[in-house]
Image (tube, rainbow, N blue to C red):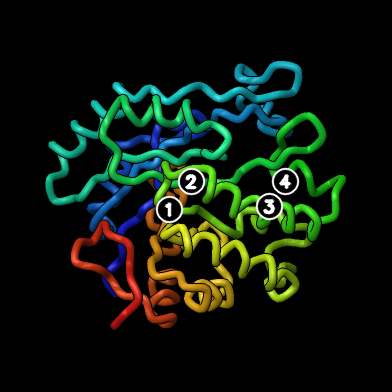
Amino acid sequence: MTLPADGHVHSEWSWDADRGAMEATCARAVELGVPAVSFTEHVDFTPFRAGFLVENFGHLVTDGILNAPVLDVAGYQESVAKCRAKFPQLRILAGMEVGQPHLHVPEVAELLAQGTFQRVIGSLHCLLDGDEFAEPWELFPHRPADEVFREYLAEIPRMVSGSEAFEVFAHIDYPVRSWPGGSDAFEPGDFEDELRQALSALAAGERVLEINTRVPLHPTILTWWRECGGRRVTFGSDAHSPDALGLGLAEAAALAESAGFQPDRKPEDPWTIAN
């Protein structure tokens, strides 16, 4: 199978990608035969509890709260331009991955106005826990996993209605990455109603569902996406280093194909429902 585009990739321009390297990632894409890459650098305006991240990003942490630096749009776009010139055979999209975009509408709009971006991903990374925001991996040790995931899913419709900045919704199964007992212990059927409500909100908002390959998406969720009116999907390795580019793309494409999705005209475009 021809590999699909990798629509969710980070380079050294993401604050947490200390092993990222845009040029080396492009070279890796050409080597693997990945036709297009979207560099969706992290944009995180939400301060959140640092947890174990303090070990590597202590310089960004004050009183246990991590405040991520703002994306250097000018430097990032210059790097994209250089890679486009060096790798003309590779389609390279400029983009960003915005955490909780509905909570930071003015800041996101100001950042988007600074450059040209072909792919904007929206992510729900943090939930409010008391007076602070925290990631699922920090919440699970002191809150029931089912409660956290239901709260996460309930926030998705609010994110759709509160932000028009993003086209693609990333890793709807994000909490499963740190699921107690491992991802194999996660059962989507335990959350069918909540998942269907979240998927329906995304579909009604004409958003694209990302099949993120860091943890294989459960096939049932992709089936529900179609049943809830979802028409488009993208794929993303969520790579933070060149060696992680493209991991799991072949398997994800096979899953999408079996669910009735097919490539569009351009390799970087989302896959659509087959006619």
- The structure residue drawn at horizontal position 62% and vertical position 66%, both measured from the top left corner, is 197
Q: Residues within 10 Å of mark 1 (few under 14, many from 20)?
A: many
136 in relation to 111, above or below: below
Q: Earlier in the sequence, mark 1 or mark 3?
A: 3
The label shown at residue 137 is 4
Task: State the residue in front, 70 or 252.
Answer: 70
CB atoms at circles 1 and 2 under 8 Å apart? yes
Q: Earlier in the sequence, mark 3 or mark 2?
A: 2
Q: Residue 95: percent from the left, percent from the top? A: 34, 40
Q: Secondary structure at mark 4?
A: helix
On-image quarter of the N terminus:
bottom left
The residue to which callout 1 is attached is 168
Q: Dividing the picture into quarters, in which one does residue 34 lie?
A: bottom left
Q: Residues within 10 Å of mark 3 (few under 14, many from 20)?
A: many
The residue to which callout 3 is attached is 152
Q: Residues within 10 Å of mark 2 (few under 14, many from 20)?
A: many
Q: Earlier in the sequence, mark 4 or mark 1?
A: 4
Give the residue type at disc 2.
Gly
On-image quarter of the C terminus:
bottom left
Q: Dividing the picture into quarters, in which one does residue 96 lie?
A: top left
The label shown at residue 122 is 2
Report the Cα–Cα distance between label 4 and label 1: 23 Å
Give the residue type at disc 3.
Tyr
Q: Earlier in the sequence, mark 4 or mark 3?
A: 4
